[in-house]
Image (cartoon, coloured by chain):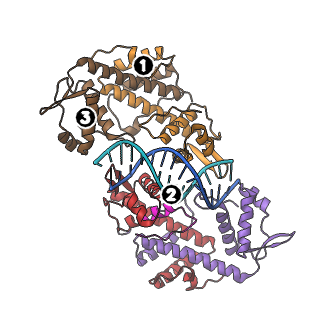
Chain colours: A brown, B orange, C red, D purple, E blue, F cyan
Amino acid sequence: MSIEFDNNLPIYLQIMNHIKRQIVSGLLQPGDKIPSVRELAADLQINPNTIQRTFQELEREEVVETKRGLGRYVTSEESKIMAIKKEMAGDLLHQFIHGMQELGFKKQDIVSIVKEAVGNEGSEGKKEERANGHTVEG
Amino acid sequence: MSIEFDNNLPIYLQIMNHIKRQIVSGLLQPGDKIPSVRELAADLQINPNTIQRTFQELEREEVVETKRGLGRYVTSEESKIMAIKKEMAGDLLHQFIHGMQELGFKKQDIVSIVKEAVGNEGSEGKKEERANGHTVEG
Amino acid sequence: MSIEFDNNLPIYLQIMNHIKRQIVSGLLQPGDKIPSVRELAADLQINPNTIQRTFQELEREEVVETKRGLGRYVTSEESKIMAIKKEMAGDLLHQFIHGMQELGFKKQDIVSIVKEAVGNEGSEGKKEERANGHTVEG
Amino acid sequence: MSIEFDNNLPIYLQIMNHIKRQIVSGLLQPGDKIPSVRELAADLQINPNTIQRTFQELEREEVVETKRGLGRYVTSEESKIMAIKKEMAGDLLHQFIHGMQELGFKKQDIVSIVKEAVGNEGSEGKKEERANGHTVEG
DNA sequence: GTGGTCTAGACCACT
DNA sequence: GTGGTCTAGACCACG
């Protein structure tokens, strides 16, 4: 596990999202044990306090649950996980479409840009090569 | 001009993005004068120093230029503006597709979700209700 | 650490240059921790915000890097430091030679003036007395 | 006449220096008439107030003198001009040598760098190409 | 403890 | 009027 951190967002939020994505995508299954604070802190080179905060928040959102003395586990309520998946997907979708429209793109532009992009984005590519060459009316 | 501010992101960054969107979408044309620090500060009820920082960063990105004693102006290099549009669109696109893939969506899912969404999103809707239109299997 | 401040140039720029010189000359080594904002502010009797700005600019130039919650460190990329050394030396050189030529000095004059100067400048001397050693015909 | 302005220094100072250099280098001779405020302002696209200030300062330094109703003229005291030349050259020299030493260059390095530079700098070259290829111990 | 942001209010240089 | 800088002091997030 490794994360590229973005300085404009609190680290604990970034780790939270990372874990939520792992759960939602099935990489972490309901009921799975998640790493301990110390373990994850060492792994990510992050202060344990920050990890602690991450887990607190995840618990508040009922994404993970603590079994005293045993460790922390992904919630086994699959409906909860589905709800999170919908929420996260909805956020991404809205942010994208709304953002593109603010940049002046029409709905049709957006669809075709996405179509084109999923064709190319099989291999990840460096951050700088992202803004690929399709041209749209100014 | 009015902006809904979101915590978690510095105000100066939000105003920066807002102005960049106005430029990229054509609402502010190349060579246009942009509001003065004091004017915008009063308008948005934000401290002038924060606006100053906003403009300073925009200048660093060569989006606006200062004419001493006269005010600030949108860059007249249209190629620069096009580059920013591409960059911002590319960022949105990457963030969306990458994010959706991390959530476990396949490329075809993504395309169809977008298609469906642009059909419904004529009316904006509150932030929380927006993910409801389409169903996704786990 | 103490700096003689010159008006006409912003303080934050003077401190920036001072730190860059310390790095380039080896006084601060790659990877070294640099003083904290509050520490340096107290040390130089300068407002912390001004120091903050100094460091922010140094970071933008990739001369220092921030470790969240830990402090700021001199970049460990030595090639970056060499590049800055070259840039700063090149600036000084250009400014000097260009300036002298604008004053009407020929290339040979410039070389001999420098030769003569390095001979005498072992002792520093006050700022005003320094141009007396050599005579130049109008 | 045209000047590249540097944003970190007041414009009137930059114009002052420019004129002083023209005088010192002989481009403007003792007793020559200098352009009027309006003329120079139009020429440089600068606010007349700024030019006015420039001339005031030059007069304070006795570099130019006003003949009422006739215009402004370069001082005819050649000794004054020589003094300015010495002062400006001394400033340049000190700034250069002192600066290079702060960067960690030894006196011998400085001399050889200058020697090398005057060999190449016959043609002016863009600002970026300045930091030429000679390598010096780290 | 660290840096990051924001507010409030001031002074300056330039047009 | 404009932007640029600086001070003073506050709050927050992170470790």
Residue type at mark 2: give it. Glu
| Badge nearest the viewer, 2 or 1 | 1
Query: Residue B90, image x and y in percent?
Result: 44, 32
Residue at 65% over, 68% down: D17
Question: Image quarter for residue A93?
Answer: top left
Please, is residue C33 above or below residue B113 in the view?
below
Q: Secondary structure at mark 2?
A: helix
Chain where mark 2 sits: D
Query: Residue D129, image x and y in percent?
Result: 50, 59
CA–CA distance between discs 2 and 1?
A: 51 Å
Q: Which residue is mark 1?
A: B130
| Badge nearest the viewer, 1 or 3 | 3
Q: Which residue is mark 3?
A: A55
Comparing B31 with B39, the one in front is: B39
Comparing E3 with D38, the one in front is: E3
Chain where mark 1 sits: B
- Which quadrant does the N terminus of chain D fall into? bottom right
Residue type at mark 1: give it. Arg
Is residue A67 rendered magenta in the image?
A: no
Q: Is residue D125 left or right of residue D81?
A: left
Q: Which residue is mark 2?
A: D128
